[in-house]
Amino acid sequence: MKIIVPMAGRGSRLLPHTLTVPKPLIPVAGIPIVYRLVRDIAKLLPEPVIEIAYVLGNPAYFGETVMAKLTELSEGLGAKTSFYRQNQPLGTGHAVMCAAPSLSGPAVIAYADTLIRANLTLDPTADSVIWVKQVENPEEFGVVELDNTGAISTLVEKPHDYVSSLAVIGIYYFKEIELLRDALQGVLEEKLTNGGEYQINDGILRMIEDGKRFVPGEVSAWMDCGNPAVTVETNGRMLDYLAAEGQELVGKVEIENSQIIKPCFIADGVVLKNSTVGPRVSIGADTVVLDSTVKNSMIQTNCHIEKTNLDGAMIGNHVRYSGVQKQLSVGDYSELE
């Protein structure tokens, strides 16, 4: 089994946090988004992962440090690492095709901007599985329509009229991913674009027209990391899941006259003095929190937070902050007093 991870986007909706760190490497509940996504998928698949192919963007942003971290992720799963570049934002289908040399055999495609809780059971009678989640606002998503056998008959992007409430979450399994490669090659050759971009849906629709059987797989939880407010909410939900699963989330912490209200992720080297932290808070390594109350927030590494009351905050690395603002989004290397 292979995993293909398109992750070339800059994450502009998550600015300023993505100015210095690519969005998939931003920690949520203590672990970078792409680490958690890939590990969760690998853990749930019925056979070992032999290769992970990452589709990165501009090397000035996705450079050697990013590649080293992703190689470490793959090697930790016993998988070969492959890197490809998507130097222009030409869509989801184009991103997949940038990894064309790796598109053979059984594979999962997972776009690196989402986190899940799921049972990734693979239907042996199906050519492909598209994971979906029931949503209340299907007009804001790509959705699948099912036929009377329960197979997927079509995909519709942000339908104006009701089609179904099963939204596509961006994770796909292909028994023979070379069939998608060939279908997308035709899309590229014919310059079949939507808004100037080549979409994976057009390749999938060609496969369905050729008689390939696509079935839905439903996830129990789908968590987005699109903007700071949503990412903070996802952080809290993930902490809830991890705590319910019995995972230990608090490392070696120096505590003085302070309280931790679980669930929280608190890394090694954190100092808490005269503070209350939690619930649903993540704090990165070597951060100091003094005379403060922090809940429903994310604070990354090497920060100094003092005399504040935070709720719904997302704070980057190497930040010094002292103030009364509850909800804020502060990028790396900022100082606010």
Image (cartoon, grey):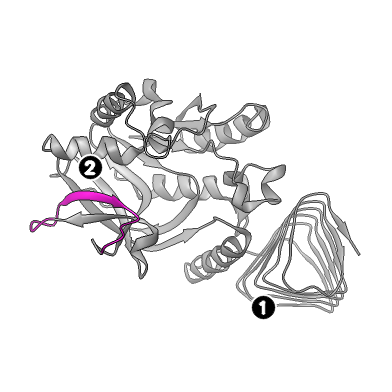
- Helix, strand or loop at mark 2: strand
> In this picture, is 16 found above or below 279?
above
Question: On the picture, is 93 further left or further right than 253?
Answer: left
Question: On the picture, is 243 further left or further right than 314?
Answer: left
**Magenta span contains residue 188:** no
> Between residues 16 and 21, which one lies in front from this camera angle?
16
**Circle 2: is it few (<14), some (14-19), or many (20+) Cα within 10 Å?**
many
Q: Nearer the viewer, mark 2 or mark 1?
A: 2
**Badge 1 amino acid:** Ile
> In this picture, is 193 found above or below 189?
below
**Circle 1 residue:** 261
Instruction: Report x, y in % for residue 329.
Output: 72, 61
Quadrant location, the N terminus: top left
Instruction: Report x, y in % for residue 260.
Output: 71, 76
Mark drawn on residue 128: 2
- Helix, strand or loop at mark 1: loop
**Badge 2 amino acid:** Ser
Residue at x 51%, y 28% (from the top left corner): 86
Mark drawn on residue 106: none
Distance CA(mark 2)–CA(mark 1):
43 Å
**Magenta span contains residue 157:** yes
**Location of residue 199 (image quadrant):** top left
Q: Residue furthest toward the right?
A: 337
**Location of residue 271 (image quadrant):** bottom right
Give the magenta-colored segment's residue range. Answer: 147-161
> In this picture, is 283 found above or below 57?
below
